[in-house]
Each structure stands twice: as C-alpha cells, then as structure tokens.
Amino acid sequence: MVEENRTPPLDALIVGAGFAGMYMLHKLRQLGLSVRVLEAAKDVGGTWYWNRYPGARCDVPSMEYSFSFSDEMQQQWNWTEVMAAQPEILEYAGQVADRFELRSSIQFETRVTDVTYDEAQCSWRVATDAGEVFQSRFCIMATGCLSVTNTPVIEGAKSFVGAIYHTGEWPHDGVDFTGKSVGIIGTGSSGIQAIPEIAKQAAHLTVFQRTPNYTMPAHNKPLTDEYQQEAKSNYADIRQQQRESLAGIIGYGFGFGGAEPTEPTDELLQTTASERMALVDKKGFGAIHRFMDIGLDMNANEMACDMYREQLSRVVDDAETAQGLMPRNYPIGCKRPVIDTQYYQTFNRDNVTLVDLRQGGIERITETGIQTEQGAFDFDVLIYATGFDAMTGALLQMNICGRDGVALSKAWEAGPRTYLGLQVHGFPNLFMITGPGSPSVLSNMMVSIEQHVDWISDCIGHMEQNQLRTIEATAPAVEEWVAHVNEVADGNMMTVPSCNSWYLGANIPGKPRIFMPYVGGVGVYRQKCDEVVSNGYEGFELANSKK
Ligand code: FAD
Ligand code: N01
C-alpha cells in the first residue's frame, strides 16, 4: 500500500456507479457530505454498461424500470419500447449522470481491492488497484447483485484458439458473427436473449444446454406517445402502487404490450385434463397464468409443467429437439422468470443445433470446440452465457474486514447474514444497497434501489443531526432477521430441494446453499424498514463516540 496516495478523509465513499451508486451519490450530496464514487468501468450504468450482448434488454416495463425520485426527469424522458433494450437503458443512465452532474464525483477505471475498518478512527480504509487509499466515515456498497461474472472451470478452456466472450463482459464495439460458427454455453436469461439474435447472423450456432429453462413470450413492442402520456399523467399513482406491491411491478406496461395483466385466482387442480388442453389450444404458453396454486402445490405445478411442455412441442418442429428443450424435474417458479422473443422458434432454423447435455455432458474444451460425451462440436467463437456469482460475489471480492479484524468472508462462511440486507454485525457504518436478505433480485430493482438509498441517506441524515458517529446492526437483530428471511422462504417453489438456482448459490461450486433474497415482498419489507426507524432504529446500535 502506498501511503503517499492517501487522499483527504471523506464523509462517504460509494463503490459502484450503476443506478444504485448514482442515486446514492445524488442523495448524499444533498446532505452536504463530501462523497466519492469508485467504479471499475469506464462510465456509469453498471449492468447496462457491461451486458451488451445481442438481445440484452429489460423484462420490466420501461415506464416502471426507471427512477421515480425526479418527477421532472420521469416526465421528460421518453422510452421507445414496452421493455427497453440495453443501449436505451445505458443512454438513460448516462442522462441521469448528466442531469445531476454526477461524473465529477466518480472516479472511473478504479477497482476497490481492500476495505478495512479502522477502529481507532471509526472509519473505513478503502484501497484500489491503482494503489490509492481512501479514508471514509461511511462506506456504501453499490456493487450490484449480478456484477461478477461466472466462468465455469472446464478442462482445456485455455486451449480454445478462437475468440471467447462472456455475455456479462461483452465488447463495447460489438461482435460480428457473419460467416462464423458459434458455440454458446448456457440457457439462462442471458443465453435465451442472445441465442435468437446470434442465430440470425452467424453461419451456425451450437447451443450447449445443461438445464432447460421455463421461458414465456415477452410480447414486447414499441410504445406509442399516447400510451406514454397517459402513463406519465398517472405516474404518482403508478409509483405508489409499485412501492406497495410484491415485486415492485404493477404490470401497467404489460397491459399495453399485448400480454394479459393477470391476477392468478383459479386453481389448476380443479381442472380436467381436457380443460387444460383446451386452454393450451387457446392461450399457448399463457395458459397457466391465471392459476394461483401453481406456486403453492407441487401437483398443480407439475400439471402446469405438462401444459408448458405440450405448447413447447407445438412450437418446435423437430420432435427430438423439442424433447431436448423440455424442462423437467424442477418446478416452474423455482428460478428467476425468463421471457423471450422467438427463443423456441430459433431451434426451427437450419443453422441452429441444440446439444442437450442431459444426454451426455461436457468433457473438455478443445482447440476447436467442445468435446462432450455425445461427441465433438467445432466452432470459431465460444460464448459463455454462464451467469454470475450473484448477490455476494462483488462484496466478497473486496476483502472487506470489519471490527476486531473479522473478514466478511469469515462472517459469511456459512452464507450471508445481514440485518434487513442493509448492514452486517461487526461492520459499522458500512451499508449494502440491495444486499442479501432484502427483496433485491426478486423485485424490479429500481424500486428496491430507491428504497434502500432513501433509507440509508435518511439514516445518515439522522446521524448528522444527532451527532452520532457510528451505526451497527446488533447480533440479535441479525439473528432474528436471518431466521425471518428463512421462515418466509420455506415452502416456496424457489427453495424446494429440486431447485438449483443462483438465488441459492447453487450455480457456484462450493458456495453455501442459502436462499439469499427476502421473499416477503417490497411493500411489506418497506413497512418493516420504516418501523425500524420509527422505533428509534431498532436493531441498530448508534453511538456518538469512538468505541
Ligand atoms: P450494477 O448495475 O451491477 O452496478 C454495480 C457497479 O459496481 C458495476 O458498474 C461494477 O463495475 C461496480 N463494481 C463492483 N465491484 C466493484 C469494485 N470492487 N470496485 C469498483 N467497482 C465495482 N433487474 C430488474 O429489475 N429488471 C430487469 O429487467 C433486469 N434485467 C437485467 C438484465 C441483465 C443482463 C442483468 C445482468 C441484470 C438485470 N437486472 C434487472 C438486474 C440489474 O443488475 C439491476 O436492475 C440494476 O441495474 C442493478 O444496479 P446496481 O447499481 O445495484 O448494480
Ligand atoms: O445466468 P444464469 P444469466 N456447463 O445463471 C449454464 C438477470 N438477467 O446470465 O442451469 C454448462 O441464469 C447454466 O446451467 P444450469 C436475471 O436476474 C436478466 O442467464 O446451472 N452449462 C445456465 O443455463 C438472471 O436470472 C435478464 O444447469 C453451464 C446458464 O449457464 C440473471 O441475470 C437478462 C455451466 C447460466 O444462467 C442471470 O442470468 C439477462 C457449465 N459448467 C440476465 N455453468 C432479463 O431479461 C453454468 N451453465 C431481465
């Protein structure tokens, strides 16, 4: 560590300049604090800066996946599609930075490598890959839940001689697949978005699928001015409904987009086999939407899976390929929902091959492609659509070390343990935005980001007013919150034993299998956070002097 590079002490240091870091900066500036943001990328945008693969887009209506904190901004900004594509969301992030003149407080191309609590000073010492050291009273992690890519360790990976890309670190100049044969590993949300687009351009695309996903047609389309004006005139109400909802989405835009806004009310268990087939005839993949017991009862869920597979077999021409694409042995609703544009239809193209790895897995990567137990597949370009070390990855990468020299990696050895997903016992004045134990990735993230940023800035404002130096979640509060998070998740389709999702850390070898987000819903969660404040920051210890 180079001591000459130590900078003057800050009130607050924020790591990350995605939507969370940008809004946090804006709020803390309003409190009159000295604030610096450190960001590894060359510009703002976070997710939307890094994930530039063909087909990347949002699956929350644009009118809802946007900031509500500035009415002027939400009235002036115009979206072009019901669900916006990555370039448009990145442009939106850029105008947020311009509008509030944020870039002057953001240091780009700077990766935080070490974060250590200085007990004598009651402040954080933050070191970067450039050898700089910052001292800051508050440290706020806006490092994202899906910002550390996962590249699986596969034997021979380095021997491949062609170009290699990861969807989460896509080249900024794009990739021209014309005349190329391409292999892609992974059929999660990223793969399902990228595959149809790459297939349109590449000479040949080979899809290596380990677990087929349940995916629904997106029905995306352009937004009309008329619709947008109507939504804007109702924005106050829309935003309030979002905040009180389960997932931060009210589906306002979906109604316009052609998909039916659905309130599940009926029971699939009460239907006959012929009624279910008649529904599939009429509504295709949408046939299962209105049944509430799919999320509650495994038998109902399996009926829905059968209906889903029936529709899939109707869309995909080749019977063997259709069988290969069919998800089995885990319930609908276990993983992050996926929506797509012409995903299954893409497998009807002559230039697309499915390799169903359930019939024989990957043995190794070779100089020219992938050797599987089913045979060898050669291509010029290899794409990893293999996801992220979600929710804890970015936090654990920073070597965070708290009070008494305890490392976060040690405190979270058996999985993340937080109070409200905002703080960890033993790490005073360190906050996480959308951390594990909050609704976070189960919600429209813009709603959850705004709620956390507002809560943290109100808390810091309260501390300033009352000359309080430190805030730390107590051990019993963490204990109780973790128990509550587990209790509400119990019995959910996302936690059944057959479910292997990144929500559970199941995608990363050796990661503790813990359900990380809070299932209780953004409305309920917001109320709990507000109650904590009205009860005098219950569960937190606030102190006005050094310990
Ligand atoms: P991020 O946008 O991830 O930003 C975190 C920033 O922190 C990054 O720029 C990163 O470079 C930086 N950083 C991390 N570690 C360090 C470090 N050590 N030093 C310096 N900088 C660091 N959510 C939805 O609600 N709806 C969607 O439709 C949706 N679509 C998505 C599509 C994709 C392809 C992906 C990957 C995610 C999607 N998400 C979606 C989730 C998305 O991550 C959030 O919506 C939101 O953009 C997160 O913002 P953030 O600021 O919290 O984190
Ligand atoms: O990642 P994933 P993602 N061999 O982890 C496979 C958000 N997002 O980037 O299921 C072979 O979902 C893995 O297989 P399996 C959203 O929150 C949103 O697609 O583990 N295959 C899986 O198929 C999303 O949930 C949008 O068996 C391997 C795939 O790689 C999250 O980001 C768009 C493998 C990874 O899927 C992550 O999505 C994009 C191996 N060794 C992303 N290792 C929207 O549309 C992994 N896989 C909003």
Image (cartoon, helix red, strand yellow):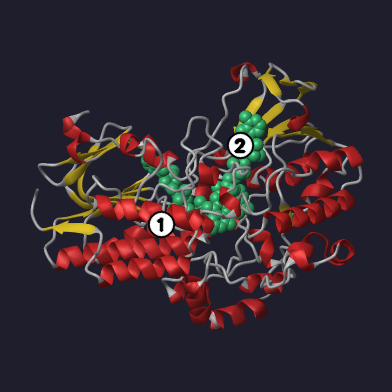
* Dot 2 amino acid type: Thr
Camera-near label (2 vs 1) is: 1
- Looking at the image, residue 264 sits to the left or right of residue 62; the answer is right
Crowd rating for badge 1 (residues with CA inside 10 Å; few <14, some 14–19, many 20+) = some
Q: CA distance from mark 2 to mark 1?
A: 31 Å
- Looking at the image, residue 319 sits to the left or right of residue 286; the answer is right
The numbered disc on residue 386 is: 2
* Dot 1 amino acid type: His
- Residue 42 visible: no
Q: Give the residue drawn at x 68%, y 53%.
A: 332
Give the image location of residue 64, x and y in percent: 55, 68
Q: Give the residue drawn at x 29%, y 63%.
A: 457
Q: Quadrant of the N terminus?
A: top left
Please tell me whether mark 1 sits on a helix, a strand or a loop.
helix
Residue denoted by label 1: 484
* On screen, residue 440 above or below 232: above
* On screen, residue 316 above or below 160: below
Question: Pointer 2 and pointer 1: residues touching (CB < 8 Å)?
Answer: no
Camera-nearest residue between 498 and 58: 498
* On screen, residue 458 above or below 43: below
Q: Is label 2's Cβ within 8 Å of ligand 2?
A: yes
- Residue 454 visible: yes
Crowd rating for badge 2 (residues with CA inside 10 Å; few <14, some 14–19, many 20+) = many
Q: Give the residue drawn at x 14%, y 56%.
A: 469
* On screen, residue 492 above or below 386: below
Q: Hey, which quadrant is residue 249 in on the image?
A: bottom right
Give the image location of residue 349, x and y in percent: 87, 42
